[in-house]
Image: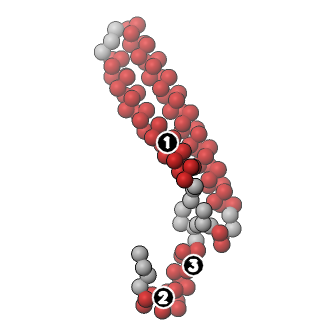
């Protein structure tokens, strides 16, 4: 989106715009990290529906079979817990790196 000429010609507005654009407006990641974080989010989100389905199926079974379905649901949850931990570790590293950068370089990958 192009910046209107009247804003660029106004010295005060131009300076404020430069200050705003110079500030960090988010955390920027490389393509591989982006894909990895997206994959972890997908794993976490897909587990919810899967566990719910397994538990609903467990409700229709007799006691011994029900226990096997519940164990399966717990095993699935363990995989999601690992994905959540990996996501949080990677996210904390990104936040720490972003906060460590001097203000002049923030907002640039």
Q: Residue at x 55, y 80 (%)?
A: 18
Name the residue beneath numbered marker 2: 8
Name the residue beneath numbered marker 3: 19
Q: Which mark is residue 39?
A: 1
- Whole-percent x, y for residue 55 in the image: 37, 22
Dot 2: within a 10 Å radius of its alpha carbon, few (fewer than 14), some, or many (20 or more) residues?
Answer: few
Q: Between disc 2 and disc 3, whose residue precedes?
A: 2
Q: Between disc 1 and disc 3, whose residue precedes?
A: 3
Tag 2's secondary structure?
Answer: helix
Dot 1: within a 10 Å radius of its alpha carbon, few (fewer than 14), some, or many (20 or more) residues?
Answer: some
- Whole-percent x, y for residue 27 in the image: 56, 59
- Whole-percent x, y for residue 2 in the image: 42, 79
In the displayed structure, 7 sits above or below 33; it is below
C-alpha gap between disc 2 and disc 3: 13 Å
State if disc 2 and disc 1 touch (CB < 8 Å).
Answer: no
Q: Is residue 23 left or right of residue 6?
A: right
Q: Quadrant of residue 84?
A: top right
C-alpha gap between disc 1 and disc 2: 41 Å
- Whole-percent x, y for residue 10 in the image: 48, 92
Q: Quadrant of the N terminus?
A: bottom left
C-alpha gap between disc 1 and disc 3: 35 Å
Q: Is residue 3 left or right of residue 61?
A: right
Which is closer to the viewer, label 1 or label 3?
1
Q: Residue at x 49, y 42 (%)?
A: 39
Q: Residue at x 30, y 15 (%)?
A: 60
Tag 1's secondary structure?
Answer: helix
Tag 3's secondary structure?
Answer: helix
Q: Nearer the viewer, residue 89 or 59?
A: 89
């Amino acid at each position: 989106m192009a910046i209107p000429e009247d804003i660029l010609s106004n010295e005060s507005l131009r300076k404020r715009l430069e200050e705003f654009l110079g500030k960090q407006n988010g955390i920027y990641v490389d393509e591989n990290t982006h894909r990895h974080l997206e994959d972890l989010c997908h794993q976490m989100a897909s587990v919810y529906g899967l566990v719910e389905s397994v538990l609903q199926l467990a409700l229709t079974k007799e006691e011994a079979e029900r226990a096997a379905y519940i164990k399966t649901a717990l095993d699935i949850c363990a995989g999601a817990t690992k994905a959540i931990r990996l996501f949080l570790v990677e996210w904390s590293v990104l936040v720490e790196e972003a906060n460590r950068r001097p203000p002049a370089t923030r907002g640039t990958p």
